[in-house]
Amino acid sequence: MLVLLGIGVVVLGFALRANPLVVVMAAALATGLAAAWTPEADLQIMYDAALATIAAFGKAFNDSRYVSIVWVVLAAIGLLERAGLQERARIAIAKVKAATTGRLLWLYFVIRQAAAALGLTSLGGHAQMVRPLVAPMAEGAAESKYGALPDRERYLIRAHAASADNIALFFGEDIFIAIASILLIKGFLEQNGIIVEPLQLSIWAIPTAIAALLIHSFRLWLLDRRLKRVLTAKPAQSEVAS
């Protein structure tokens, strides 16, 4: 039961709002030392256990070192934003008269879902696409029609931009046969005595993806209606108040 001390360290560290990296490292060391401890253990045994825990961390980081590439991407996105990427995106979408927030997010939803169905799950994402491009363009489409946006509507648009990415990816990737979610479903069903081929799962994911597209299309239509109702009513209210 001593190995469960690591969980206590995690709970205590997060309760104290300590640095998450320090908390996780401390929890790993606590678990490793607790697993090696016996009444006969001396300092050398505990020292070796600490070194083995740190070595396991190093091996895991080395095996997954490609994950650190995301920091390079974030730096590039930050430089683009500093150079005016969001402003240019707003200006570009404002020139399209037929563009609305709902239509723009619907188009992104379709592209994101189709790309995920082909296995291109990295073609999009919150950090790479939604924050620097999709959300500013959706806000720009609303601003071109209704003027400056109140914070409530601005955050609502951003939330819909993020949800479009999430839902499109979630229901689109299951159509691609060589995806981790398909293998997870296949393994779970086999454990319960149900033998299903990955291709069958992919085929049955298509109706679900279509349903997600239709439902989210309706939600985006409601978003356009809400923005039109709320943002066109505010000028009238201010004129009455004056």
Image (tube, rainbow, N blue to C red):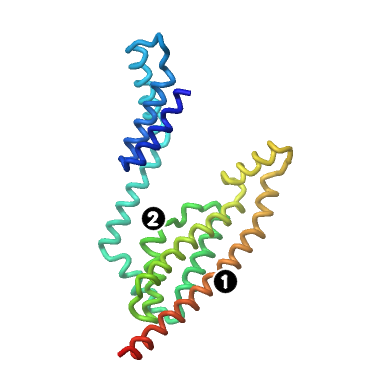
Q: Are marks 2 and 1 in contact (CB under 8 Å)?
A: no
Amino acid on which disc 2 is placed: Ala
**Residue found at x 48% / y 23%:** 1
Where does the image place residue 201, in percent across and percent down from the top left? 67, 49
| Nearer the observer, 174 or 39 | 39
Identify the residue at the far top of this view: 40
Where does the image place residue 15, in percent across and percent down from the top left? 36, 41
Q: Residues within 10 Å of mark 2 (few under 14, many from 20)?
A: some
**Residue found at x 33% / y 52%:** 74
- Locate residue 88: give its quadrant: bottom left
Left or right of residue 54, residue 105 in this image: right
17 lies above or below 143: above
Q: Nearer the viewer, mark 2 or mark 1?
A: 1
Left or right of residue 234, residue 167 in this image: right
Q: Residues within 10 Å of mark 1 (few under 14, many from 20)?
A: some
Q: Quadrant of the C terminus?
A: bottom left
73 lies above or below 85: above
Q: Which mark is residue 236?
A: none
**Residue found at x 45% / y 81%:** 228
Kindly identify which residue carries mark 2: 127
* Gap in angstroms between the C-alphas marked 2 and 1: 26 Å
Count of residue discs: 2
99 lies above or below 65: below
**Residue found at x 50% / y 57%:** 166
Where does the image place residue 206, in percent across and percent down from the top left? 65, 58
Q: Which mark is residue 218?
A: 1
Where does the image place residue 19, in percent across and percent down from the top left? 31, 40
Left or right of residue 132, residue 189 in this image: right
Amino acid on which disc 1 is placed: Phe
| Nearer the observer, 155 or 41 | 41
